[in-house]
Amino acid sequence: PKYVYDFTEGNKDLKDLLGGKGANLAEMTNIGLPVPPGFTITTEACRHYLRHGGMPDGLEGEIGEHLAALEARMGKRLGQADDPLLVSVRSGAKFSMPGMMETVLNIGLNDDSVLGLAKQSGNDRFAWDSYRRLIQMFGKTVLGIGDELFEDAMDDLKGEREDTDLDAADLQRLVETFKGIVRERTGRDFPADPRVQMDLAVRAVFDSWNAPRAILYRRQERIPADLGTAVNIVAMVFGNMGPDSGTGVAFTRDPGSGRQGVYGDYLRNAQGEDVVAGIRNTVPLQELETINPPAYRELLDIMATLERHYRDLCDIEFTIERGKLWMLQTRVGKRTAEAAFCIATQLVDEGLIDMDEAVIRVTGDQLAQLMFPRFAATAGNRRLTHGMNASPGAAAGKAVFSSERAVELAGRGEAVILVRRETNPDDLAGMIAAQGVLTSRGGKTSHAAVVARGMGKTCVCGAEELDVDTHARRFTAPGGIVVNEGEVISIDGGTGAVYLGEVPVTASPVAEYFEGEPAGDELVRAVDRIMTHADSVRRLAVWANADTAEDAARARRYGAQGIGLCRTEHMFLGERRRLVEDLILAATPKERQAALDALEPLQTGDFTGIFTAMRGLPVTIRLIDPPLHEFLPDLTDLAVKVAVAEERAGKGADDRDRRLLAAVKRLHEQNPMLGLRGVRLGLTIPGLFAMQVRAIAAAARRVEGARAEIMIPLVGAVQELEIVREEAERILAEAGVEAAIGTMIEVPRAALTAGQIAESAEFFSFGTNDLTQMTWGFSRDDVESGFFGRYLDLGVFGVSPFESIDREGVGRLMRIAAEEGRRTRPGLKIGICGEHGGDPDSVHFCHGIGLDYVSCSPFRIPVARLEAGRAAL
Ligand code: ADP
Ligand code: MG
Ligand code: MG
């Protein structure tokens, strides 16, 4: 293969091969911008080097040829004693990894050529400054000598002076000191041979791909570990030749807000890294207009050219050598979420891109960020600790330690933060009532985190330094600071920080827009345009997971086209728990029926509210799913209670508690998630499902425009569904109500026998939480606090399969189920209602396998709408 490309041979689409920097240097060269000549050694050469521990055959020769061509073009040889060509050796991977890898400038200088450079430039100081920089960078990057040794030597020499105050003699002395450091640290002299310098630098850049910090960065940013880096060899241009020279960085527009204008920094008489390193204070780029008007005008021209060419915001590095402008780097620049939306629509208005492209240019994650409230400032607030940034946003309120207290205080109009060691389904009411949730245990996929993200509620979880004592209603933070119930704290779900006292919070205008406020400022107008277009191009419908009329109403405001999952079990919690207990304790069919009769009108009321909120749109109601013991008291608590009561009253202890204890013991299961739940409950507890179906029918009759769909959970065999279906159909027919009856696909066997199941099911909905749990054999309530961290470190998967659909495994089952289900029943309606329904990557997957809709929590609906649009483009 060809391992080396001249800048005139590449282009911006060759990032895989030439890296981002090399591809864009080639692109700029080819559109006629002033780029110093050079060439790029490919990532393929790097991959070979890393795999085999040596350069591939033929590479040396190819580099030699390209170097010779460069020398011919420049009219001087690398390191030529009387007039040296100097080059930089620069890393540049496909994805930018800022500051992670290495670059060496001024390759080609030695004791002879430094004199030639001085003579040719007529500038001794410049020549010695360049030489000392080479030894320093080479020492650090190639020879692995700690930079502080060089820095200290330079500081000693400078004393109170600035680096520009050092004269040629100072710098010559510094070069000797630096060479001494190299000798002392490596036992060898600094290599004088220019080609040896260059070759060693190339190897060092290749090696820097596997530097620990680069590995860490890639893991965080999910950049594949095996891409390798390209190496760019670029003829040097000099910003350190005097006051008419300098170097700078700039953006073509403001990466924070997207506003057009001149955004950059400039540093006179300086080279490369000085700008970012903060050696001296830079000046705003506007000042270049007075320092060097022609170069400034040319730079603005070039920035305009780049924006037109890339049709996007670019960032650039440039150098001015004695008044002449040179471009050293460009790329499509990173930006904030706000800027992403504004820039996309600005570019549409400027005619550079169309609305399709604008939708592609923003992401659901960026939109989600824009919807959360933020802290105005954290000045003066004591930081108590930090945990994981589980669900973004900012929240302040009184610390409360139980769901009940949260509900109580919130009911009085007070802002509260629910603080728990960890949360469980019982805390739901408190989580809803609270401004935010703080836990001391559990990771980003713990109950608290998942539920909070779903609700769009701020959450910091796993703040392990906190000692939470829910009984005493207080927690203790590092330093022995005790926070009691009622004291105000603030949590930042974006950073994970926890503060004492109230940090002021401001609402997000984007969230207010989705709540129905008219589009006001530029950002909201941009969001509005992009959402409108995304809606017009998407094929996937977006439904909501909502269990209450309020959630349903919010979902509808956010654009939900139906409810894909209405869980009925939440309706059995709270004060209704006693009725469920009655059902479980029933000793005779009559008692059982009495308990069911008590529940039925309550259920009817719940469904009536939801049907009313969703009038005209489908509402998928899932019959009861979780194991029954979830509705019963905790075994240990109850056992203690009964024991204490018996101690006190002898045989006269509360009989109900004793019967309850027996029921809890009877229903106790080793693996409740694989136990008596879902359709299995319906087939074992006579009358339970029938009661729910009657309630649905009654509610549907009450509400004009109600569109009920009944969903049976945990089906693994068509026979299970058939039995439930028969009874349900009878009840519906008696009530004169029409409702489709379908099933969740969440047990692997259901996916594998979907062809049979579709004979009975009128629709499918993938329950990907359970499907993932059962496909991998991971208990989702346990793994994430356990070994998942290790699995992520080891790269078993790049992201938790509970966050984003595992395409090869779980996704394959989905594909099979969708295909075989539709083969049996053409036009079978298929959706997804797991956590994944609001995950951008999973939305794209669902689009790809031809689902009809994704269903997600109300707060994620805008994200799903946007991503469904992006998936269609
Ligand atoms: P990074 O990827 O960390 O930005 P670069 O390869 O861009 O590293 O180089 C570091 C600095 O050196 C940049 O400021 C760049 O502009 C400057 N630089 C690189 N090559 C040259 C060159 N041939 N002439 C002048 N300056 C250069
Ligand atoms: Mg750079
Ligand atoms: Mg399930």
Image (spheres, grey):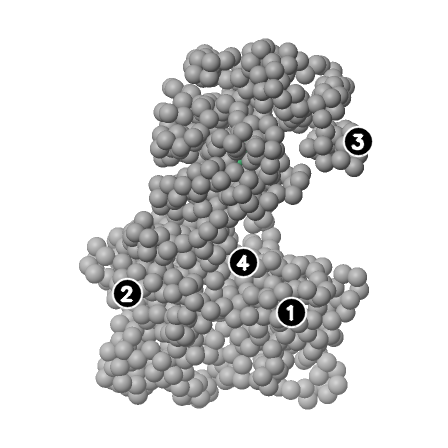
Pick the quarter of the image with the N terminus. Answer: top left
**Residue contact between numbered discs 3 and 1, judged by CB atoms under 8 Å:** no
Q: Dot 4 surroundings within 10 Å: few (below 14), some, or many (20 or more)?
A: many
For this orientation, the residue located farthest to the left is: 826
Mark 3 or 1: the one toward you: 3
Indicate which disc, 3 or 4, sits on the residue closer to the N terminus.
3
User: Is 359 placed above or below 159 here?
Assistant: below
Residue 280 location in percent, x, y? Answer: 66, 40
Spatial CA span between label 3 and label 4: 52 Å
Residue situated in front as seen by the camera: 112 or 543: 112
**Residue contact between numbered discs 2 and 1, judged by CB atoms under 8 Å:** no
| SS of the residue under disc 3 | helix
Is residue 499 visible to us here?
A: yes
Mark 2 or 4: the one toward you: 4
Residue at 50% over, 17% down: 55
Residue at 54% over, 62% down: 392
| SS of the residue under disc 2 | strand
Q: Kindly identify which numbered label has been placed on residue 503.
A: 1
User: Is 570 placed above or below 675 here?
Assistant: below
Q: Disc 3 residue type?
A: Asp
Q: Which residue is mark 3?
A: 156
Q: Which residue is mark 4?
A: 445
Q: Which residue is mark 2?
A: 763
Q: Disc 4 residue type?
A: Thr
